[in-house]
Image (cartoon, rainbow, N blue to C red):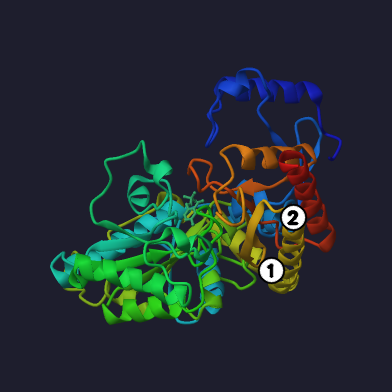
Amino acid sequence: MDGNFNENDISRVVEADRAHIWHHLSQHKPYETTDPRIIVEGKGMRVWDQKGKEHLDAVSGGVWTVNVGYGRERIANAVRDQLIKLNYFAGSAGSIPGSNFAEMLIDKMPGMSRVYYCNSGSEANEKGFKMVRQIAHKRYGGKKHKILYRDRDYHGTTIACLSAGGQDERNAQYGPFTDGFVRVPHCLEYRAFEQDGAPQENYGIWAADQIEKVILAEGPDTVGALCLEPVTAGGGVITPPEGYWDRVQEICKKYDILLHIDEVVCGVGRTGTWFGYQHYGIKPDMVTMAKGVASGYAAIACLVTTEEVFNMFKDDASDPMNYFRDISTFGGCTAGPTAGIENMAIIEDENLLQNTTDMGHYMLDELNALADKHAVIGQVRGKGLFLGAELVEDRASRAPVAEGLVQQIVGDCMQQGVIIGATNRSLPGKNNTLCFSPALIATKDDINQIVSAVDGALGRVFG
Ligand code: PMP
């Protein structure tokens, strides 16, 4: 740390936290007897807490966000200069960083054309859903309004996003939900044996065909869009099986269904390409992104569409209702696109897509080597620096390890100064995957430290 660390100040901060902060995803009772964790500083891959303890961050700020690492003066300086020049203007006006970042983004997304700015992944997804609904009203008499989403996928925290949420425990206390969202099965091959009728061979085609079955049951003329994560994040780090995406695209085309790809986690480098969908030859109609867009240096999310989708909101100018009747107050902040520009430039200048691919392969191999040693690791999977290790009681039954054990591993690693993650803790039986998403700057030494911490933790918890 930089030496400005003051014990008295920090204990005051801890007390204020205990008195006034309502932490995300937290039961607060334990904070009555233990200190909440305050992160004070970050540099590169590492953060320091209120006790001055150093942690290697293997989850990029907790939730797959700080892709270019901490302490980037280049981003901070650009944002500072822009804020002094013009911090904000919203509504129908544009901005210089807004145009520049949009151009940069579209350059990386062949086939895409328009960028709609907002603040969070949830908001971007909601706006995508609204576009689908408006298209349904305008073109199909309101009929083609249903949005399909997948078991285990997550698209955000609002009621409409939870209505499109495939993680039941996250939803359990927040109904009633919004009409017109329909679930399709997941495509996690490792758990195919739990799905009725799943074949041993060509599972990817079968899993995609299950989507078609739902479309036919609902009526293709009622289905407007399919919203999927290219690699599912919190639902278990699910890489798509062979043949899956080609078939999914065929199905969308056949029934004139818009493909909405949720890149909130995969977006901007995480998997070793600019976007996760680019591994699979997917041609989306809408793409949403948030976390890695500015690596957490500013709050920004984008909904990117094709010109074709955009035109549906422009072509009939004689209709006073034919425009996207939507706004995002903080979509007018210039800090977001300014940070986005520098974030992307850093990824390019430092060749971080290549590093992500190389280090991703290295980490996958190292985790697989760990699986040779610890039978509790049932499967290691992922893409780039977006990896998961699913823990099972035994490899034959693939029964998930008991509740709480995954959190013991996370806690043990934390003791060792390495922050790792786990799949959504509120999914009983499905919260058994350790998650790794170090910054795209990770080195072999960093990865060795992460894997060695997990090795030690697995040895202590599972013997
Ligand atoms: N989509 C996915 C795939 C996510 O993982 C998340 C957040 N974890 C969201 C959407 C929602 O993003 P936000 O929290 O920025 O609203």
Q: Which residue is mark 2?
A: 73
| 173 up-or-down from 13: above or below | below
> Residue 428: percent from the left, percent from the top?
48, 42
Q: Of discs 2 and 1, which sits in the foreground?
A: 1
Inspect this view and state whether residue 180 appears. Answer: yes
> Residue 136: percent from the left, percent from the top?
21, 67
Tell me the quarter of the picture where residue 145 sits: bottom left
Left or right, 57 with reference to 216: right
| 448 up-or-down from 287: above or below | above
Inspect this view and state whether residue 305 appears. Answer: no
- Tell me the quadrant of the picture where the C terminus can be found: top right
Left or right, 90 with reference to 325: right
Q: Amino acid at mark 1?
A: Ile
| Residue in the picture at 57% in, 40% down | 402
> Whole-Å distance between the Cαs marked 2 and 1?
14 Å
Q: Amino acid at mark 2?
A: Glu
| Residue in the picture at 62% in, 22% down | 31
As drawn, the label of residue 54 is none
| 154 up-or-down from 172: above or below | below
Q: Which residue is mark 1?
A: 347
- Number of marks: 2
